[in-house]
Image (cartoon, rainbow, N blue to C red):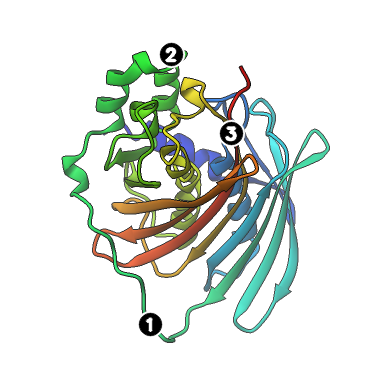
Amino acid sequence: MNDRPLQSLLDLLDLERIEEDIFRGASRPAVIPRVFGGQVAAQALVAAGRTVPEDRTAHSLHAYFLRPGDPGAPIVYTVDRIRDGRSFTTRRVVAVQHGQPVFHLSASFQTFEEGLEHQAPMPDAPDPETLPTAEEMLPRHAHLFRDPGVVDRILEARAAVDLRYVEPPPYVTAGKGPREPRSQVWFRTAGKLADDPLLHVCLATYVSDMTLLDSVLLAHGRGGWAIGDVVGASLDHAMWFHRPFRADEWLLYDQESPSASGGRGLGQARIYTADGQLAISVIQEGVIRVPRT
């Protein structure tokens, strides 16, 4: 397995500390001409985590995407130490480019403690090893895209992650009528990671922005920006990290959309480990507009 794409992603998340609570992160070209939202969210969480005691792990984040990021310029992350309590630590991070905030994140960290335990059961899903890889699936459908060259850009952008759809993605079934507003993907990094819990949380944050709004598109028989039948962008993003997990082992991303209105669509999801543990809950709202003809 080629581990260069994963190492490139890890380098992207290895922020430069330029002051006590100020960090700088590189950007890189994305599939679309703006910074990928998962990148800025993961980098902001890295910045927050580097100001927190090592015995405290992230248990939640809440974020807003304020402006499109410029992939040709670095991003500066300023961390505010909002609270350091006996059990919880809270950080606020503002990401700035060209003198303007482009992203805002609040994250909370907690020392481990025992408590009540229950969870929603893991839904049925096929073995990820039986599903086609992106390299196997995307080229077969290149003719569906406005620009067939976008396939290579998607594969390059996602090369650090092995992401496999359980059912055909929206661009494959666009125009064939509405489907149930639910989508499942399995994912893991394309290589092993160090044991640092913050790293695994940040990698899951990175991937969580890739497919969450697919279920909105399915409800309306739309295929997405790549085939030109919608225009979209992430607005806000929230995650709760319930139990330990590894981002280099298979995780099931079970996604659904309860609502779309006002030019916005809502996606909500649960991420399970392969052995059925509910690891993460996710909610995201995004702009989803139908282009005027």
Q: How crowded is mark 2: few (under 14 residues within 10 Å), some or many (20 or more)?
A: few
Q: Considering depth in this image, is 168 or 80 the residue closer to the camera?
A: 168
State the separation of the CA atoms marked 3 and 1.
37 Å
Q: Is residue 162 left or right of residue 285?
A: left
- Placement of 57 over or under 196, stated as above or below: below
Reading the image, the residue beneath label 1 is 117
- Which quadrant holds residue 33? top right
Q: Is mark 1 on a helix, strand or loop?
A: loop
**What kind of element bears circle 3?**
strand
Judging depth in this view, the residue of 190 and 129 nearest the camera is 129
Q: Is residue 91 left or right of residue 60?
A: right
Q: Tell me the amino acid under the disc marked 2.
A: Gly
Q: Residue at x 69, y 76 (%)?
A: 84
Q: Nearer the viewer, mark 3 or mark 1?
A: 3
Looking at the image, the residue that sits furthest to the right is: 99
For the residue labelled by badge 2, is the local secondary structure a helix, a strand or a loop? loop
Relative to 23, is 73 above or below? above
CA gap, disc 3 and disc 2: 20 Å
Q: Say whether residue 60 is visible.
A: yes
Question: Mark 3 highlights which residue?
Answer: 232
Q: Where is residue 263 in the image (x, y as percent from the top left)?
A: 63, 39
Q: What's under tag 1, amino acid-wise?
A: Glu
Q: Are marks 3 and 2 in contact (CB under 8 Å)?
A: no
Q: Mark 2 points at which residue?
A: 149
The quadrant the C terminus occupies is: top right
Neighbour class for label 1 at 10 Å: few (<14), some, many (≥20)? few
Q: Which of marks 1 and 2 is nearer the N terminus?
A: 1
Tell me which numbered mark, 3 or 1, is placed earlier along the sequence: 1
Q: How many marks?
A: 3
Tell me, yes or no, if residue 266 can be seen here.
Answer: no
Question: What residue is shown at x 40% (from left), y 70% (from top)?
Answer: 243
